[in-house]
Image (spheres, rainbow, N blue to C red):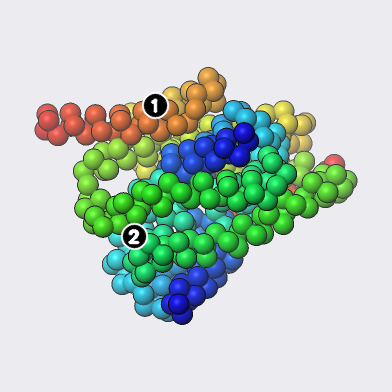
């Protein structure tokens, strides 16, 4: 029982103090579960990150599930992911309950008028940083361009784009091996 | 049955959400804005802003927020948040035993050769969808967008600081 509580507290701490989620959480989780609590070895942790990134879903939740599972199987994974999601759940719930009362205040409206285009910029930046990070070149740039146009211009569900991309990757891999 | 729709939408978002928070945005947007109209484009942008400044991943934050605004009930928040996490549980608990095998699986590798470049397109579509008249109300919006883009891209200004700066400029400009 004590260890469940410890797992919960460790992940709740991480969930409370990482603003922006996902990647920002990785170093904090590493510090907590590898360095401080010594629950997991560093090499296991690196494997977990790799699997968390390849599995669908929210990265922070995936890491919590895998760490919790490693410690206390199924129950551990529930406790760890509860810990990491509960703080943001409660904070956002409070905001959802009260934001509608505040959003009509004049100075808040003024701020959000300027915040909205800035947020769009915050989303536009990772288009380029991600493209650079994964090494998009003249040949492969056609994939993101078509994907973006299909979703943006023709309103195709991203679900189909994701399925098509994964299947495309599998077909490419098959022929690549066959003719090598 | 809005609760069931919420559950299905967020289950889908959890199941097909590859490539991190920003890539997930277009999926969330497609479901909650375009498909069901639970919130407006503007509200969606506001949620992204709020999410950048509060703890936790955008996937959870949007589920909690939209779950509430779609139903006016905390149960909606709970269902959406639970649903977005559920596919992760199912998939990871299945592969937990064959962990290392999954990591080095050639088919997973192959699929990601297609998924990775598509992720860039997903993020781009999220940005393009948000470049709409609801968010860009006048020429000042365009100037703010360019300034925020340059500051974040080239001067590595932190997103939270960027939102605060934008907020202050809003007080001065509007």
Picture residue at 43% right of the left edge, 24% below the top: A146
Q: Nearer the viewer, residue A164 or B31?
A: B31
Of badges 1 and 2, the one in the foreground is 2
Label 1–label 2 contact, CB within 8 A: no
Q: Does residue A124 show up? A: no
Residue B77 at x, y percent in the picture: 63, 49
- Label 2 CA crowd tier, 10 Å (few <14, some 14–19, many 20+): many
Q: Could you tell me which chain the residue with mark 1 belongs to?
A: A
Residue under the point 12% across and 29% down: A179
* Mark drawn on residue A113: none
Task: Kindly identify which chain the residue marked by label 2 belongs to.
Answer: A
Q: Which residue is mark 1?
A: A142
What residue is at 37 percent from the left and 43 percent from the top?
Answer: A134
Q: Nearer the viewer, residue B110 or A56?
A: A56
Give the x, y percent position of residue B47.
66, 45
Nearer-N-terminus badge (1/2): 2
Q: Is residue A30 placed above or below A176 in the rendered structure?
A: below
Whether residue A169 is visible to the viewer of this picture, yes or no, is yes
Q: Position of residue A30 (x, y in %)?
A: 41, 69
Percent coordinates x, y for residue A120 in the rendering: 63, 39
Q: Residues within 10 Å of mark 1 (few under 14, many from 20)?
A: some
Quickly name the residue at label 2: A48
């Amino acid at each position: 029982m004590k260890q469940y509580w410890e797992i919960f507290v460790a992940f709740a701490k991480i969930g409370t103090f990482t603003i922006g989620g996902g990647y920002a959480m990785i170093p904090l989780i590493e510090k907590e579960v590898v360095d401080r609590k010594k629950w997991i070895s560093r090499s296991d942790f690196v494997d977990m990150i790799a699997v968390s990134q390849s599995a669908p879903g929210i990265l922070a939740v995936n890491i919590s599930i895998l760490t919790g599972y490693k410690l206390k199987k199924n129950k551990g994974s529930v406790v760890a992911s509860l810990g990491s999601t509960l703080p943001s759940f409660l904070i956002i719930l409070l905001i959802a309950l009260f934001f509608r009362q505040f959003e009509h205040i004049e100075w808040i409206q003024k701020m959000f008028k300027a915040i909205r285009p800035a947020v769009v910029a915050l989303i536009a930046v990772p288009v380029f940083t991600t493209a650079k990070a994964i090494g998009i070149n003249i040949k492969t740039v056609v994939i993101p361009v078509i994907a973006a146009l299909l979703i943006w211009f023709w309103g195709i569900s991203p679900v189909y784009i994701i399925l098509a991309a994964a299947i495309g990757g599998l077909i490419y891999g098959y022929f690549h091996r066959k003719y090598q | 049955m809005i609760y069931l729709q919420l559950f299905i939408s967020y289950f889908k978002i959890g199941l097909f959400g590859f490539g991190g928070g920003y890539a997930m945005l277009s999926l969330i947007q497609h479901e909650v804005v375009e498909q069901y109209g639970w919130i407006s484009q503007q509200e969606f942008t506001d949620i992204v802003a709020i999410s950048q400044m509060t703890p936790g991943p955008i996937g959870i934050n949007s589920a909690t927020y939209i779950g509430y605004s779609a139903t006016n009930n905390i149960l909606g928040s709970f269902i959406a948040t639970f649903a977005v996490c559920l596919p992760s549980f199912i998939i990871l608990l299945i592969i937990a035993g064959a962990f290392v095998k999954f990591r080095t699986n050639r088919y997973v590798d192959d699929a990601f050769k297609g998924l990775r470049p598509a992720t860039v397109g997903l993020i781009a579509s999220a940005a393009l969808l948000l470049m709409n008249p609801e968010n860009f109300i006048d020429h000042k919006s365009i100037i703010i967008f360019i300034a925020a883009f340059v500051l974040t891209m080239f001067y590595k200004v932190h997103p939270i600081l960027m939102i605060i700066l934008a907020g202050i400029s809003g007080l001065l400009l509007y």
